[in-house]
Image (cartoon, rainbow, N blue to C red):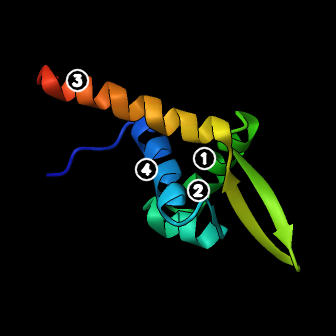
Amino acid sequence: MTERRSKLEIVFDILAFMQRKGGRIKPTHILYGGNLSYNRLKEYIKELEDKELIVLVEDKDKKFYQITDKGLNLIYEFKKIKEITDAFGL
């Protein structure tokens, strides 16, 4: 049986996926990359926007979400914490 991801892990997964895809992707790609339902995607997008981790960008009638410097910093800090907790077996 698989363990459920924590909220922080889901946020990290979304932001890391965006970073791997060049930092700017369509909402549907976030849906697939984050492995989320549509309703959960909307909740996470709103929260990430509210916390200024991503921004909505419109280009030629298409909508994209772009990761911000604040979002990139969160990825960096999360990776450091994960390395420490893994080193201690937590």
CA gap between label 1 and label 2 equals 5 Å
CA gap between label 1 and label 4 equals 11 Å
> Up-down: is 62 above or below 45?
below
**Dot 2 or dot 3, earlier in sequence:** 2
Q: Amino acid at mark 4?
A: Asp
Quick one: SS at disc 3?
Answer: helix
Whole-percent x, y for residue 29 in the image: 56, 71
Res 18 → quadrant:
bottom right
Depth check, front residue: 66 or 14: 66
**Dot 3 or dot 1, earlier in sequence:** 1
Instruction: Kindly identify the residue that appears in the image at 66 percent across and 70 percent down.
Output: 26
Q: Are marks 1 and 4 in contact (CB under 8 Å)?
A: no
Whole-percent x, y for residue 62 in the image: 81, 77
Instruction: Kindly identify the residue that appears in the image at 75 percent across and 36 percent down.
Output: 50
Label 4, residues with CA under 10 Å away: few <14, some 14-19, many ≥20? some
According to the image, label 1 marks what residue? Answer: 44
Quick one: SS at disc 4?
Answer: helix
> Up-down: is 13 above or below 57?
above
Instruction: Kindly identify the residue that appears in the image at 45 percent across and 29 percent down.
Output: 77
Q: Are marks 1 and 2 in contact (CB under 8 Å)?
A: yes
According to the image, label 2 marks what residue? Answer: 41
According to the image, label 4 marks what residue? Answer: 13
Residue furthest bottom as drawn: 60
Quick one: SS at disc 1?
Answer: helix
Q: Amino acid at mark 2?
A: Leu
**Which mark, by number, is residue 85?**
3
Whole-percent x, y for residue 2 in the image: 19, 51
Q: Are marks 2 and 4 in contact (CB under 8 Å)?
A: no
Decide if residue 70 is on the left or right side of residue 86. Answer: right
